[in-house]
Amino acid sequence: MASYTAQQAEAALKPQFDVYAKAVDDEKWDVVEGFYHPNGVLVHKDKECTFGNKAITAYLAKFAEGTGKSVATVSNAKYEGAGDYLIITADFSADTEKAGTVKGKFLQIWKKEGDRHLVFHDEFEITA
């Protein structure tokens, strides 16, 4: 199983992640759904989890309804990967319309499917 240097993992994942993150900010849920693996899992750490790309997208849309329009900033991103998997861990801060600033951490594991990677495991926690 080949492993990636941090630079290789970032070069492979960051362009895809940036398009995904913009689609989330823009609430383009049909586009967001296309980034999740059909067997993907979204974990809200210590609270709940959601299975499948359609259910995950519905969960994110409902979450966005509660916070209103938001723009997230990602910081301290770390990329790594091996075999068919690319991983990003990072902190985020989202300025939201209804909930003020929401801060937290996330981990995403993207699995290779054909010629692209899809989010297979997405875990986040709200820290402030």
Image (cartoon, rainbow, N blue to C red):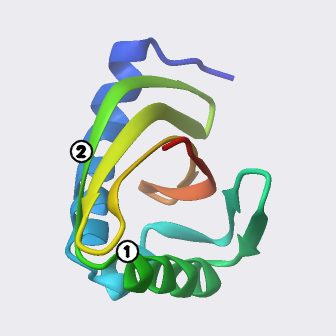
Between 23 and 1, the one nearer to me in the picture: 23
Q: Which amino acid does label 2 sit on?
A: Pro
Instruction: Name the residue rendered at 52%, 36% in the picture.
Output: 86
Instruction: Name the residue rendered at 70%, 58% in the picture.
Output: 43
Q: What element carries label 1?
A: helix
Question: Can you give x and y, in whole percent of width and height, for residue 42 in the image?
Answer: 65, 63
State which quadrant residue 53 falls in.
Answer: bottom right
Mark 2 vs mark 1, foreground winner is 1
Q: Name the residue under label 1.
A: 67
Q: How far apart are marks 2 and 1 (CA)?
A: 26 Å
Q: Name the residue under label 2.
A: 15
Question: Can you give x and y, in whole percent of width and height, for residue 39 in the image?
Answer: 71, 71
Q: Residue 44 shows which numbered tag?
A: none
Against 113, is 77 above or below?
above
State which quadrant residue 97 falls in.
Answer: bottom left
Q: Which amino acid does label 1 sit on?
A: Thr
Figure label count: 2
Against 45, is 30 above or below?
below
State which quadrant residue 92 falls in.
Answer: top left
